[in-house]
Amino acid sequence: MRLKNSVIFVAIILFLSSFSAFAQESELNVVDEVIAQVNDGVITLSKIKREMKTAEESFRQAGKTEAEAKAEVEKNKGQLIANIINEELLIQKASEIGLEKQVEARTNRQLLQLAQQYNLKSLDQLYQAMQQQNIDPQEYRALIKKQVTRDLVWESEVDAVLYYGFKPKDIKAYYQQHIDKFKKPATITISEIFLSFAGANKADVIAKAKTLVERARKGEDFKKLAVENSDRPNVADTKGKAGTFKVGELDPLFAKPLKGVKVGEITDPIEMEIGMEILRVDERTKGSDESFFDEDAVRRAMLIEKLPNARKKYMKKLREDAYIKIKSDYRALVTPALDADATAKNESGK
């Protein structure tokens, strides 16, 4: 069960359906030209146009009019191109340090998780579902792969270096200075029955969820009900066990119905975008006002604080070490969006 933000398949469908349509149109209508060279790679006008259209569609889905969306994207065009340059640098770095297999593996894993979330048994089934919604599966895969590449480079080149680089004396000093952060949190252990809306009548699913809650509250075995009714692909193994979570980090969608529910009790059915959730509280542990030292927890807290600036510095160094040549017509637009120091070594080309 995802108790933090879930991937919304409907949003993906809306987003990528639009992306597919305007991508095809751009390919037909745009006369391509190189806007920037990044080492041995190039940033083309057609790529920029596609990214702009994608951004416009995102703004429209967020409630802006077409004119407002276009104006917003145009205003941030320089930053958009700068972002594309940064992405190209990360892709090149991933290849340089040999992350290709890891990128493919994590991309497949994320797509399989999405498929399982919607009770689809394989990537082929996921791709077929996308095609039925006029979504190009390869375009979506490319989007995920780009995000995975970025994350893996940062994890290996920045996050891990920072995490393991903290000295023992600094770790102890941070703990003493932020001792309130390391109090034992209250936790909750939960089991679930998930009923998917996919391929079903929504009203029937809601009615079934209410019936299952009644049966569970009358004493029927929750594990048995979960195995027989839950749409989670791995329910036969988990028997409905969802895990243990920090109470303070629960998604509000679940925190509110769980509030006040005692151990052994069942929540009312919870409606989500993708289906209905029924939760049983298996265990609760109280928090403590007493702080305790956990080196991993302290390292992670330090990492969270220092990571944004560390990643920014890493990207600056990548740009400094790269050959970046921006077309003269775009230089004044893009250069301010890049770190001024990082672009000092860039060649000013026409």
Image (cartoon, grey):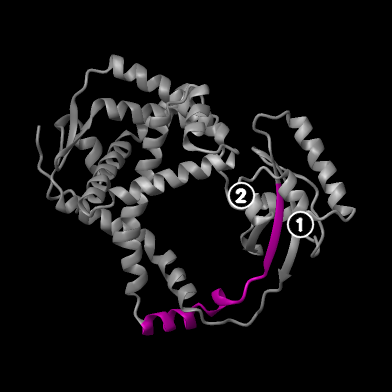
Nearer to us in this view, 336 or 275: 275
Q: Which residue is drawn at 26% across and 50% down?
A: 94
From mark 2 to mark 1, how far is it between C-alphas? 18 Å
> Label 2 sits on what residue type?
Asn
Q: State left or right for residue 250 relative to residue 322.
A: right
Up/down of 78 relative to 222, above or below: above
- Residue 249 horizontal/vertical position (percent): 61, 60
Residue 185 magenta-highlighted: yes
Identify residue for label 1. Answer: 280
Image height of 181 relative to 80, above or below:
below
Asked if the residue under mark 1 is in contact with the one under mark 2, i.e. CB atoms within 8 Å, the reply is: no
Span shown in magenta = 168-193
Horizontally, residue 171 falls left or right of residue 348, namely: right
- Tell me if residue 201 can be seen: yes
Q: Tell me the quarter of the image containing the C terminus.
A: top left
In the image, residue 56 lies at what x, y percent?
43, 28
Q: Earlier in the sequence, mark 2 or mark 1?
A: 2
Label 2 crowd (10 A; few <14 / some 14-19 / many >=20): few
In front of the other: 226 or 118: 226
The residue shown at (36%, 33%) is 75
| Residue at horizontal 65 percent and vertical 80 percent from the top | 289
Task: Tell me the number on the disc at residue 234.
Answer: 2
